[in-house]
Image: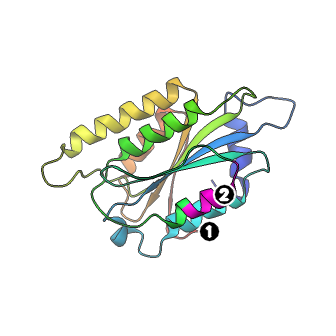
């Protein structure tokens, strides 16, 4: 799942893509902004990688950004304006707990609410350490993991593929399961390449 070829991978796997003509995509970038990212991504690879994905978008592709910790901290509507997307990615910082289901759910909402009259393929690229943790007094990790699976099932029901990218000490089991539910793929990265 190299940044340089990601559009071809999404075009080949997305059920909404045309077979004989150029297909365009709506991509939801779901980026972990929880406090654990200080430890698992101290160099900010998730933001650098997301910006590389944005740079690889085709001219007519669109994107949205959802930054999450134990709630939503950044959210943009689907847009073709790369400046809005880059600025949203830059504004994500490491604070709070981790609720992956919130991030996926918000992105699914953004993608399903965007006009898809031209039958664009839709995908989510999730960049996280995959360690759900709502913090003191919040839901248990087990409960959050189930909510995350449910958010992935909602994405699958809307023909949205989720590609999960684990950073640092990633919970590979959960991230593999989320991508599998939507016929996506899972990768780990240790750099932004």
Measured as percent of width and height from the top left, residue 61 is found at: 73, 45
Give the residue at x 33% y 49%. 71
Q: Is residue 192 one of those drawn in magenta? A: no
> Is 159 placed left or right of 35 in the picture?
right
Q: Nearer the viewer, residue 169 or 117?
A: 117
SS of the residue under disc 1: loop
Q: Residue at x 25, y 52 (%)?
A: 133
Give the mark, 1 or 2, whose residue is nearer the N terminus: 2
Question: To which quarter of the image does residue 67 belong?
Answer: bottom left
Instruction: Using the image, determine if residue 109 lies above or below residue 32.
Output: above
Residue 59 position in % (x across, y down): 79, 50
Q: Position of residue 28 (x, y in %)?
A: 56, 45
Distance from label 1 to label 2 (Cα)?
Answer: 14 Å
Residue furthest left as drawn: 137
Residue 54, by quadrant, is bottom right
Residue 153, relative to residue 54: is it above or below?
A: above
Q: Which residues are drawn in magenta? A: 80-87
- Few, some or many residues within 10 Å of mark 1 (<14, 14–19, 20+): few
Q: Residue furthest right?
A: 20
Task: Say which quadrant the C terminus sits in.
Answer: bottom right
Secondary structure type for disc 2: helix
Whether 144 is drawn above or below 131: the answer is above
Q: Report which residue position mark 1 lands on.
A: 193
**Residue at mark 2:** 54
Residue sitting at 19 percent across and 55 percent down? 135
């Amino acid at each position: 799942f190299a940044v340089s070829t990601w559009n071809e991978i999404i075009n080949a796997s997305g059920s909404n893509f045309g077979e004989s003509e150029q297909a365009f995509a709506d991509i939801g970038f779901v980026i972990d902004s929880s406090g654990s990212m200080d430890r698992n991504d101290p160099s900010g690879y998730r933001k650098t990688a997301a910006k590389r994905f944005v740079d690889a978008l085709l001219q007519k592709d669109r994107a949205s950004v959802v930054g999450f910790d134990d709630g939503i901290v950044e959210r943009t509507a689907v847009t073709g304006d790369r400046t809005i997307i880059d600025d949203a990615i830059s504004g994500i910082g490491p604070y709070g707990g981790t609720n992956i289901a919130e991030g996926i759910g918000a992105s699914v909402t953004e993608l399903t609410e965007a006009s898809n009259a031209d039958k664009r393929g839709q995908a989510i690229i999730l960049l996280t350490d995959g360690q759900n943790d709502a913090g003191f007094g919040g839901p248990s990790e087990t409960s959050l993991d189930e909510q995350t699976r449910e958010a992935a099932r909602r994405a699958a029901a809307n023909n949205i593929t989720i590609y999960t990218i684990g950073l640092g000490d990633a919970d590979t089991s959960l991230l593999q399961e989320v991508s599998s539910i939507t016929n996506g793929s899972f990768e780990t990265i240790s750099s932004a390449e």
